[in-house]
Image: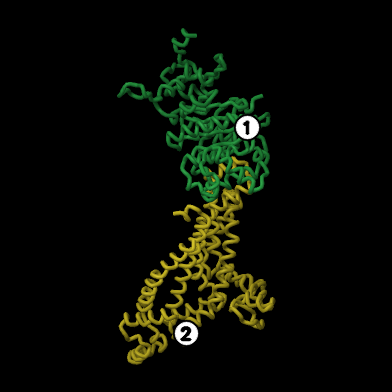
Chain colours: A yellow, B green
Amino acid sequence: MLRFTIRRLLQAIPTLFVLSVLVFAWLRSLPGGPATALLGDKATPESIASLEKIMGLDQPLYLQYFNFLGRMLSGDMGNSIISADPVLEEIGRALPATIELSVVALLIAVLLGIPLGYLSASYRGRFFDNATIMGTLAGVAVPVFFLGIVLKYVFAQELGLLPPSSRQDADIDATRVTGFATLDGMLTGEWDATGNALWHLVLPAIALSSIPLAVIVRITRASVLDVLNEDFIRTANAKGLQATVVRTRHVLRNALLPVSTTVGLQTGLLLGGAVLTEKVFVWGGLGSLLSEGIQRRDYPRLQALILLAAGVYVLVNLLVDISYAIIDPRVRTS
Amino acid sequence: MALLEVRDLTVVFERKGTKPFTAVDHVSFDVEPGQTVGLVGESGCGKSVTSLAIMGLLPARGARVTGSVLFEGVDLLTLPDKQFRDRRGRDLAMVFQDPLSSLNPVIPIGIQVTEVLERHRDMPRKKAMVEAAGLLDKVGIPDPTRRLSEYPHQLSGGMRQRALIAIALACRPRLLIADEPTTALDVTIQAQILALLKELVHDMGTALVMITHDLGVVAGLCDEVNVLYGGRVVEKAERHELFAAPRHPYTHGLLASIPRLDAPRGEKLNPIRGSVSDNIPWTEGCAFAPRCPNKLDVCVRVTPEQEDIGGGRLLRCHNPVKPPVVEEVSV
């Protein structure tokens, strides 16, 4: 398993390398550039050209790329054009917020989605099943930002049950340790801070979990129905095993194979959804860095963010493959 | 009292929007303790459905099962699911056709054997593992202790079927149903598996219901044979009688269609014309009539009833094959 993991990590290097070229070229093919964005509409071509010269953007593209690559290999992704801070620092500050939100959303999707999908398959064709299918259809169809706005309107504004935005109330004076609002409270014993952070997580996490939840429910349901038709389930029943043993040991384990792939793919997509959700709930994570960066053509920041997203995606898929190998012995030996 | 009494077992598959399909139609037969009974017929004649109905393994939705299946006097068809599960795997067990798909691909063989022992013989896992190794050894799997931790895909087809047999016989059931246990295997392995089954059921005193389309299997194994056609028993006889003097044209056709090694080169095979799919329902006339060489006018109008023709034989035919003259002279 260790060799498998190392091999997969090594395989990720060329992937990320190719991606760095693509991202680099793609960003520079966008109309406008950081100089135009900085100087505004009324800037003269001369002033833009001189600013580009200062930024080093007048050099040939390949030279710019090799500069970028050289710095990246020594761990420097450059400074943000917007804030002048090193982009890695910026990202380090914003990352915990996004991770917190994504992890909670994913937990909701997995912990709720798999049981719901299983139950749906067990009650196939009955009211519960039909209701779940309708619900998941809605979950996939409604855009994340719209759901976020509706949730905010109903639960925060009209009912006043939950906070409408930000990660913690402003009057909570929490000590920062890791940057994770929920963890920091636990580490320092400031439980009210943790509680407040969790309270703030509810709405955005629900909004963000809607699509992965719906997809996981559907895949689990289909997968369970497939497995229920397998011969080995008949064998398990022929052995006289209790229904619960058949359902867990024999059905669930096999049904989880396609589900784990889906969870991996959805984790990758989660980052995209997180940008929108963060915007709606004024979350202040990577989402705001990204949207601001795109508007103002902040090349270094965007390069770092996109490569980070790609790295996460590669890592998540590695985890999926490892989980596959753990669940399915046929993958292990081949 | 017979170990198993199947009476008027009928299975109708119903699906919304389609005509109900009668897969098994008033099938009755008995199995005495320790006896081996064959259920023989082509694909689609209802033999597998019969076995699944006896084991209570048909899907709950879409299949209507009527009649009675008395196992030691208890009607399995009306037994609550929980109590049936207590008996399955312990009192009656089953070996399936395709050993690869019948074993769980993600669970080691050992666990698949021990879970029956844990369930029905209250063995702790450790003790069950030792017992499981013994069982694998008994069904002829070499190096059983190592095999316990292996997965189905690491075993050969024959080994897998042996493992399934070990699972089925783990609790020394009084009845074993084997549904075409050798169909998916190589010919040489087939003979080994049959010999193994024969030996084990003999040693344990287990009664065996052998479901097969292969009359060679019947000849080597069964005490009594039920020939099924279109979901009904068309002929029932003791093995020797059946082979010596098949009376139903279908049985006769099955026997005649076996290729013979001593036949002259180039001699044509003798298939039964048509296939089960073009059968007509038993409601008017005989279902075999469209394929029958002995067909009379009455065959397509009146459904033949099952008759006792003596010597423990049952027959459902208007115009049976005449018993061979040679036999009559020699008796």
> Three-letter amino acid code at disc 2?
Pro
Q: Residue at x 48, y 33 (%)?
A: B192
Q: Are marks 2 and 1 in contact (CB under 8 Å)?
A: no
Local crowd size for mark 2, using a 10 Å CA cut-off: few (<14), some (14–19), many (≥20)? some
Expressed as whole percent of the image width and height from the top left, the position of residue B138 reads 56, 37
Q: Nearer the viewer, residue B322 or A164?
A: B322
In the displayed structure, would residue A183 be above or below residue B323?
below
- Secondary structure under tag 1 reads loop
Expressed as whole percent of the image width and height from the top left, the position of residue A296 reads 43, 82
Give the quadrant of residue A65: bottom left
Viewed as shown, does residue B253 lie left or right of A120?
left
Q: Nearer the viewer, residue B209 or A291?
A: B209
> Three-letter amino acid code at disc 1?
Arg
Q: Residue at x 47, y 84 (%)?
A: A86
For this orientation, the residue located farthest to the top is: B329
Instruction: Determine which residue is flagged by label 1.
Output: B174
